[in-house]
Image (cartoon, rainbow, N blue to C red):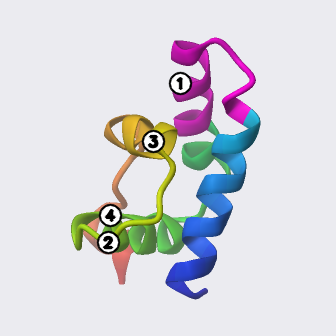
Amino acid sequence: MSADKIVRMANDIAKFMESKPHAEGVSMLAAHINDFWEPRMRRQFFQKLDAGEAGFRPLVLEAAGAIRRPAAEEAA
């Protein structure tokens, strides 16, 4: 999956969660990605995030700390 699609998907989730109270939106965004994104997708998410590339909505950036990084054996 392309990095641009990962950003778009995360931002789409964030747009929906922005209608919730702030703390709930952050928590629900992280939970959604943790529950429904496979390790490969989360790895791509963190590669984009760690590279400091722009494009993520602020809610995605806030939720990033609660999103599970894939384990090394899952990352391959």
Query: Of the numbered discs in the image, which one, if any, rests on residue 72?
Result: none
The secondary element bearing badge 1 is classed as: helix
Q: Residues within 10 Å of mark 3 (few under 14, many from 20)?
A: few
Check disc 4 and report the residue beneath it.
49
The magenta-colored residue range is: 17-31
Query: Of the numbered discs in the image, which one, if any, rests on residue 58?
Result: 3
The secondary element bearing badge 3 is classed as: helix
Query: Of the numbered discs in the image, which one, if any, rests on residue 53?
Result: 2
Residue 27 magenta-highlighted: yes
Q: CA distance from mark 3 to mark 4?
A: 12 Å
Q: CA distance from mark 4 to mark 2?
A: 6 Å
Residue shown at 50%/37% (left/top)?
Answer: 59
Residues marked 2 and 3 touching at CB (< 8 Å):
no
The tag earlier along the polypeptide, 3 or 1, is 1
Q: What is the x, y in percent for residue 43?
A: 40, 70
**With 4 as the anchor, is 75 left or right in this view?**
left
Q: CA distance from mark 3 to mark 1?
A: 13 Å
Is 16 placed above or below 22 here? below
- Compare residues 32 and 18 and report the one nearer the observer: 18
Residue shown at 69%/31% (left/top)?
Answer: 17
Check disc 1 and report the residue beneath it.
27
Is 73 placed above or below 19 here? below
Q: At label 1, which amino acid type do we have?
A: Ser
Q: Quadrant of the N terminus?
A: bottom right
Residues marked 1 and 2 touching at CB (< 8 Å):
no
Name the dominant secondary structure of the magenta segment: helix
The tag earlier along the polypeptide, 4 or 1, is 1
The tag earlier along the polypeptide, 1 or 2, is 1
